[in-house]
Image: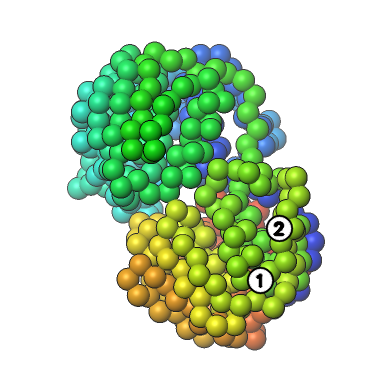
Amino acid sequence: MKKFVKPSKINGQVDAPASKSMVQRALTAALLAEEPSTILNVTYSSDAQAALRVIQALGARVTIRDKDVYIEGGMNPTGEALNCGESGLSMRMFSAVAALWHRELTLTGEGSLFTRPISMIEKPLKELGVAVTTTNGCPPLTVEGPLRGGEAEVDGSVSSQFLTGLLIALPAAPQDSCLKVKNLKSTPYIDMTLTLLKTCGIRVENSDYQVFRMKGKQRYRPGEYRVEGDWSGASFLLVAGALGGSIRVTGLDTSSPQADRRIIDALKAAGAGVTLGGSSVEIKKKALTAFDFDAADCPDLFPPLVALACNCTGTTAIKGVERLKYKESSRAAVLQKEFSALGARIRLDGDMMKIEGTKLAGGTVDSHNDHRIAMAGALAAINAEGEITIAGSECVAKSYPGFFEDFSSIGGIVHE
């Protein structure tokens, strides 16, 4: 599907979508609780729907009422296959959770998920008593538990998502556990996991993100959990305001552990007007200048930051390119290719991306089935010289199915 986006003036207010990362974590915790739980304020992105499928296949009974999900937990798999869609978090997280079961289960998926590396899960799971087989270090994979607990070493250099899975699963294992973690990236995502675990009554000792200790046989506390707004999705809206006029995004926790909350730092560095409220952020367009930014812990910010940098005077430098290799697309190369086709001047230099501010032309952006590339294409159109066509725009459903509707509501001119 194609979307055609014209240069636009931005003005209005939007509620942030719910965090898909927190939705998936909350659904998993509810699966492990012995009594019913309610997850409030759910946005049904493709990744959230994948997690819902998996917890149902693992034995949860689910009732959906508007934006609320009622879950009766309990591990009792109804089949042997768990379809994680294209969700890297679901694949890596549920590989540990599914291993709590005592029979073989297969985790599979769709599309780009088959190219996402999961070799980091094999050694730790085996050390914890699980039989595991991957497909040359990628999905699909099989696990056969039970996950008994104990000691294991975890490599966090590619992703923190598998560590999240272990931190969720091991408190329910029969033995106490100690995880020694090396080269951990994206520590804010582990903070998100630890925050949820504390809410659920689970205790984990964290020693400088290098050693995690937890008792076994802990019980997940059921209850009502409201999912906070998604800073990842909101980052595109906030940058839209900085480029095209003004915007107020509500439903955001300004003290959230979400890594992408740092979009505020980048917008301030670029010179945008930033006002923080209790649960909202207001952005106003001002003269924008080049900035330096380290996105190693928040690599999902690269797409909106590239659109922002193209509209800044001078050359912006963004660090963290190495974190973009295993996304839905080879995201650094795709950003360079697609924005260069619009007239951008982007250079990749090792772990650094350098963007020279320039007026973008109209043209076509191929999303490469990457939701964040599609949304970045819409931002590129705001101050462009002509219309921008976004090919494969439907992929925004992975994280933010209502993006184009929300973008239109604040002045974005979009048609099919």
Amino acid of disc 1: Gly
SS for callout 2: helix
Q: Residue at x 35, y 75 (%)?
A: 349
Picture quadrant where residue 412 is located: bottom right
Picture quadrant where residue 376 is located: bottom right
* Residue at the spot of label 2: 406
In the picture provided, is 331 more to the left or to the right than 99?
A: right
Residue 359 visible, this angle: yes
Q: Residue at x 35, y 67 (%)?
A: 351
338 in relation to 402, above or below = below
Looking at the picture, how far across and down is residue 385, in whole percent? 64, 86
281 in relation to 41, above or below = below
Disc 1 packing (10 Å; few <14; some 14–19; many ≥20): some
Disc 2 packing (10 Å; few <14; some 14–19; many ≥20): some
Q: Residue at x 30, y 26 (%)?
A: 178
Residue closest to the eye, 394 or 204: 204
The numbered disc on residue 271 is 1
Q: Quadrant of the C terminus?
A: bottom right
Looking at the picture, how far across and down is residue 243, in whole percent? 68, 72
